[in-house]
């Protein structure tokens, strides 16, 4: 059956949403059909996690922006920014205007860490801190960087990013796109020691090799590991045993970690990596004063078990980086236990498990916050295959409004100051120009306030048009 002409709305202009749009465009073209795609974003600027979730000193990861830019710059996908679905436009209203709606809203909340004292002042979630140092427009402009000793709980890349940003000397961040208010905050920080704690051993960290290797290249920061926490690995090495199933990635990371043993060189700041530590309690009288951990061991079945031995570390701040969690999308079923939109292979499902006509999900809001950015491509392909199949079989929504520009009339009637791709190009050029006039030339100086982003985008779009 030939595909009918399609109009599709995608909610979320991060990698998941942009990849989904590009894959959909190509899939429909391959079948000789046509599709118009509108990409809605709650922020004035696109790129989601890349702009507001990746540490500013990771230019290689941010290079993904180049490919995302090409996809949007081709003109086949319309960006409609500064629009909150559920507030400015309801999902039901999208169904009235589009054959299908794809939710790609990601996961931006912190997963819970249920231990005593976790709510004490001085205890923070990773998502909030990352949003601050990346210049997210909807978080406060200041951050209480008052601790000399800091604990970061978690053994993934986000934990490592947070630890590195806290320990790094601000002068080594100047060349990045870190916002000026963040630089000022970091320059006032008295931090000397950052401790990263993981429940498992050195062979089970969730870092990627490049993230770990970069840690050892931070100027004037010693990376410290502890021999006693390598006891199990040393015993295997002494016996000449190599556990089956270890990937090259794991072997590379173990080599890197072992190279840091006994390497302390008297740097001004120290970043400590601790293994076999399960958080038991945040200590303090009125605010964070320390963290209590139970030492762990990995059993023969691979499970982590407590040893009954506890150890306290004096710290004045705690950052929990134990994972992200999705937020409900108004008008869509939500699995509160998993933090995802209820779905089967990308088809959003109702309380009975039946697919909701014309409603789909992709990315972290579909499968949970696991995997790297590149994994969203395969994820989007599954969702798009189902959407195209449903289009072929006549199982999409039945729009009652067919005017492609009517969505703009609706937003304007409601006083929504939406932004566009042309507006983003103007904001992008503006941020780059700010970097050129800075005392130390930078790639860009990121504009943080939402109203200023909107003003630059909308004024610039008028000039460009």
Image: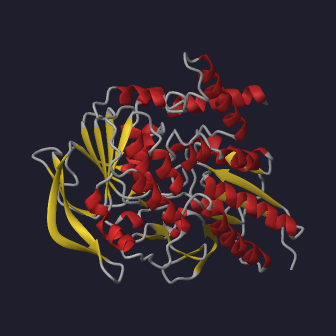
The quarter of the picture where the N terminus appears is bottom right
Nearer to us in this view, 341 or 238? 238
Nearer to us in this view, 92 or 108? 108
Q: Is residue 258 visible?
A: yes
Q: Is residue 97 visible?
A: no
Picture mark count: 0
Q: Residue 136 vs residue 228: left or right?
A: right
Give the quarter of the image for residue 81. top right
> Residue 425, position in %: x, y?
70, 34
Question: Where 257 sits versus 399, above or below?
Answer: above
Residue at image point 31% right, 35% down: 266
Residue positioned most to the right: 32
Residue at image point 40% right, 60% down: 323
> Residue 56, position in %: x, y?
51, 39
Q: Residue 97 vs residue 442: left or right?
A: right
The quarter of the picture where the C terminus appears is top right
Give the quarter of the image for residue 117. bottom left
Question: Where 381 sits versus 455, above or below?
Answer: below
> Residue 376, position in %: x, y?
61, 62
Residue at image point 34% right, 66% down: 201
Q: Residue 217 vs residue 310: left or right?
A: right
Nearer to us in this view, 150 or 328? 150
- Colour setup of the view: secondary structure
């Amino acid at each position: 059956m030939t595909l009918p002409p399609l109009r599709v709305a995608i909610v979320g202009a991060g990698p998941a949403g942009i990849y989904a749009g590009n894959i959909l465009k190509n899939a429909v073209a391959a079948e000789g059909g046509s599709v118009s795609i509108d990409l809605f974003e709650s922020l004035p600027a696109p790129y989601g996690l890349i702009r507001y979730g990746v540490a500013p000193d990771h230019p290689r990861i941010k290079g993904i922006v180049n490919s995302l830019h090409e996809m949007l710059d081709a003109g086949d996908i319309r960006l409609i920014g500064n629009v909150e679905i559920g507030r400015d436009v309801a999902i039901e209203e999208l169904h009235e205007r589009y054959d299908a709606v794809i939710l790609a809203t990601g996961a931006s909340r912190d997963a819970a860490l249920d231990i005593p004292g976790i709510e004490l002042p001085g205890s923070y979630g990773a998502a909030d801190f990352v949003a601050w140092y990346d210049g997210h427009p909807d978080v406060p402009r200041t951050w209480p960087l008052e601790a000399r000793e800091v604990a970061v709980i978690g053994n993934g890349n986000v934990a490592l990013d947070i630890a590195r940003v806290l320990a790094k000397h601000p002068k080594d961040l100047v060349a990045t796109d870190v916002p000026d208010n963040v630089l000022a905050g970091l320059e006032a920080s008295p931090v000397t020691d950052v401790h990263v704690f993981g429940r498992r051993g050195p062979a089970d960290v969730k870092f990627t090799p490049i993230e770990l290797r970069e840690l050892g290249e931070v100027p004037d920061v010693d990376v410290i590991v502890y021999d006693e926490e390598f006891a199990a690995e040393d015993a295997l090495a002494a016996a000449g045993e190599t556990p089956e199933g270890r990937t090259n990635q794991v072997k590379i990371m173990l080599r890197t970690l072992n190279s840091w043993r006994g390497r302390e060189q008297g740097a001004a700041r120290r970043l400590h990596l601790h293994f076999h530590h399960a958080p038991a309690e945040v200590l303090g009288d009125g605010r964070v004063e320390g963290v209590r951990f139970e030492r762990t061991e990995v059993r023969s079945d691979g499970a982590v078990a407590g040893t009954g031995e506890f150890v306290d570390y004096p710290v004045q701040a705690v950052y929990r980086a134990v994972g992200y969690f999705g937020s409900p999308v108004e008008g869509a079923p939500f699995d509160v236990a998993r933090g995802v939109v209820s779905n089967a292979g990308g088809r959003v499902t109702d309380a009975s498990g039946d697919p909701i006509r014309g409603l789909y999900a992709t990315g972290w809001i579909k499968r949970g916050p696991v995997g790297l950015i590149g994994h969203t491509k395969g994820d989007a392909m599954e969702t798009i295959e189902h959407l195209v199949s449903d289009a072929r079989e006549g199982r999409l929504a039945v729009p009652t409004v067919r005017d492609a520009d009517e969505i703009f009339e609706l937003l304007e009637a409601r006083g929504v100051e939406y932004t566009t791709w042309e507006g983003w190009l103007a904001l992008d050029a503006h941020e780059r120009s700010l970097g050129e006039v800075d005392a130390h030339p930078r790639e860009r100086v990121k504009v943080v306030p939402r109203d200023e982003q909107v003003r630059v985008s909308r004024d610039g779009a008028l000039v460009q048009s």
